[in-house]
Amino acid sequence: QVQLVESGGGWVHAGGSLRLSCAASGRTSSARTMGWFRQAPGKEREFVARINWSGGSTDYADSVKGRFTISRDNAKNTVYLQVDSLKPEDTAVYYCAASRDYYSGTFYTRPNYWGQGTQVTVSS
């Protein structure tokens, strides 16, 4: 099993930045693909970004491209999401997720592990 704990959420004005962190523990070698999802009030959870084991491959939802950057530090078992140029529509609970697969498409719909989420609120 892999446990994921997010941190770094908060309240910011539009245009501001945050850095979200997700620390993995347990069988961390199983967290091959890691990434972030978000769920806004009244909406379904949606994919935000993912990164492969080496950090050499990443991809993003169109809505966050150019504003969000995902990275990972395997020595610290941590994945980060730098969120810049925040907009009110970015307000959501952000969830860290991890998958045992090697960067397959199943991550978008069926990650194996989830964190509890961290709230990001952006005011206009």
Image: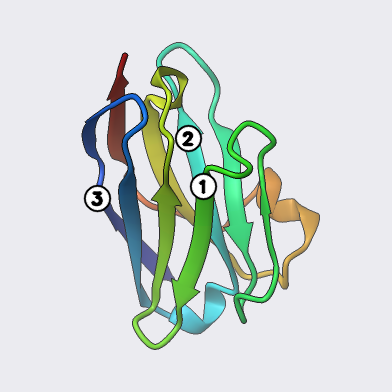
Q: Quadrant of residue 62?
A: top right
Q: Position of residue 2 (x, y in %)?
A: 42, 69
63 in relation to 94, above or below: above
67 and 33: which is toward the camera? 67
Q: Position of residue 64 (x, y in %)?
A: 58, 37
- For marks 1 and 3, the one nearer the N-term is 3
Q: Position of residue 44 (x, y in %)?
A: 55, 22
- Spot the residue most to the bottom: 75
Q: Position of residue 120 (x, y in %)?
A: 30, 33
Question: For the point 41% across and 61% down, which residue is it?
Answer: 80
* Residue that mark 3 sits on: 8
Question: For the point 43% across and 54% down, which residue is it?
Answer: 81
Total marks shown come to: 3
Question: For the point 51% across and 83% down, which residue is it?
Answer: 29
Whether residue 18 is visible to the viewer of this picture, yes or no, is yes
| Element carrying mark 3 | loop
Work out how far the residue at label 1 is from the one at label 3, CA to CA, in angstroms.
14 Å
Report the side of 44 relative to 7 (left or right). right
53 in relation to 6, above or below: below
Amino acid type assigned to the residue bearing label 1 in the image: Phe
Amino acid type assigned to the residue bearing label 2 in the image: Arg
| Element carrying mark 1 | strand
* Residue that mark 1 sits on: 68
Report the side of 13 relative to 2 (left or right). left
* Residue that mark 2 sits on: 38
